[in-house]
Amino acid sequence: MAKPAAKVRASEHRNYIDGQWVAPASGEYIENRNPADTRDLIGRFPASTVEDINRAVAAASEAFTKWRKVPAPRRAEILFKAGEILIRRKEEFARAMTREMGKVLKETSGDVQEAIDMTYFIAGEGRRLHGFTTKAELPNKFAMCVREPIGVCGLITPWNFPMAIPSWKITPALICGNTMVIKPAEDTPHSTYNFVEALEEAGVPAGVVNIVSGYGEQAGAALVNHPAVRLISFTGSTDVGRIVGQAAAATDKICSLEMGGKNVVMIMEDADLSLAVEGVLWGAFGTSGQRCTAASRVVVHKKVARKFTSMLVDGAKRLRLGNGMDDKSDVGPVINQEAVDKILGYIEIGQREDKAKLLCGGRRAEKGDLKHGFFIEPAVFGGVRPQMRIAQEEIFGPVVSIIECRDLDDAIETANGVKYGLSASIYTRDANRAFRAMEEVQTGIFYVNASTIGAEVHLPFGGAKATGNGHREGGTQVLDIFSEWKSVYVDYSGRLQRAQIDNQ
């Protein structure tokens, strides 16, 4: 959401460029306010422009010549130190994130922990970064391939996981020998700043990591279009991701896109309904539904649909809205007024669609202190059909739609009947059903008897169809984004060998 830019004041933060915290060239700043209480000003962050991006990219370009030659195990030592710093400051960073982003403290603590896990995991790759050797097809010839760094990487991250997702991009880029400029989401820059500060304290050299805050239309576009940036890694909406991908293609950049989702939980008639209800409540309303992996569709067998729906509605009504700093809160605010308007707009659309019924929630909460924040009551729709807009389009809020199915085949057809393909799950006691669904559902992530959220850093993360462009973050697979393969041939025959020509 575009917020008014303000002139420099006492609570200002700065960009981090070439090892220095520097003011934006424009002298203008963006207010960062607590979405649970907009009276709480967290700080003012740079409203950066192309001039700031140019300066940061120049610093990253210069630093690359030395950083790429630092042995990977030495680069890994810096990441291990950063992991130790994150552990030491975990509670501090989690509380700062709750204040900035709104999700409850146990979730922000998990966000910081994910950054810790990713930092340690990728640091371990500093002594691997494996290529491979193979037998050549000609005598007296050696063949192998190795990973090489790419250069300057442009990283654009979203607001919903403001430390975890930056860690998923920054750490593998670093371990592969790249330098970078990161543009965090304008709604939640502070958590990314905290992560970069940990890297600075751990000893990342000047110019290797640069952070430039600002709006996507100015700073983000300048980063994507800069000719010296060799790679763009973007996480965000499908609409914006498509624009980023087109711009990257126009300048021959490597491009990794992680975009939207419309995830499904399939509940069969033999499922443990209590377990399924717990999973749906967590998957649909954790982070106020603001996850690309959120469980926004529940396809439930008609034999248990009435019972499950009643249990889910009862559970949703018991969830407590409130400031994430309060231990009694289950669900925090959504991120801003624009999100409120979008979510309430979809709830209105759902109520207008034929036969869909709002069973609970769906209103903006404005009692007491909640009136100062962006709180929406968790909403459950019943009687939803697969082609309705609320069952097709990503809402990115605390809204879940219940769709009945006849059998497993019907459930799989509904699961696959959207343009996205990120995450899915099935609740069943039948192993055969579970494996069939695992094979047939078109997603990059699949869970059995668990919700659609809960990725682990050592496995690849990403999806099919409009969810992304085929790359995966997490796991060792992320190294394929941030490195290029070089094939090396050593001919020690002492004579000309012409590969396939001499091998017929």
Image: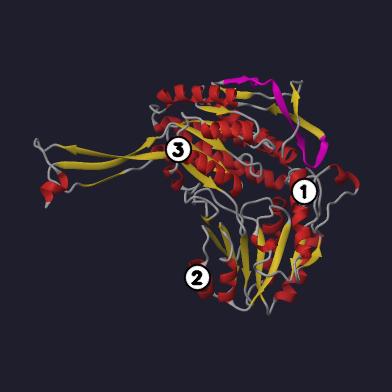
Residue 186 lies left or right of residue 42; in this view the side is: left
Q: Secondary structure at mark 3?
A: loop
Asked whether 23 falls inside the magenta stretch, the response is yes
Name the mark nearer the viewer: 2 or 1.
1
Q: Nearer the viewer, residue 20 or 29?
A: 29
Give residue 340's mark: 1
Asked whether 307 falls inside the magenta stretch, the response is no
Q: Quadrant of residue 312?
A: bottom right
Residue 178 lies left or right of residue 191; in this view the side is: left
Q: Is residue 303 above or below residue 469?
A: below
Residue interval drawn in magenta: 20-39
Query: Label 3 to label 2, Cα distance in Å?
Result: 38 Å
Q: Nearer the viewer, residue 490 or 106?
A: 490
Q: Which residue is found at the position 68% from the left and 44% from the top?
A: 108
Give residue 435's mark: 2
Q: Which residue is found at the position 59% from the left and 23% from the top?
A: 52
Q: Which residue is label 3 attached to?
A: 253
Residue 334 appearing in the image? no
- Give the amino acid at mark 2: Phe
Pointer 3 or 2: first along the chain: 3
Name the mark nearer the viewer: 1 or 3.
3
x, y (%) of residue 267? Answer: 63, 71
x, y (%) of residue 266? Answer: 62, 69
Q: Secondary structure at mark 1?
A: helix
Residue 445 lies left or right of residue 304; in this view the side is: left
Q: Magenta segment, principal secondary structure? A: strand
Q: Secondary structure at mark 2?
A: helix
Pointer 1 or 3: first along the chain: 3
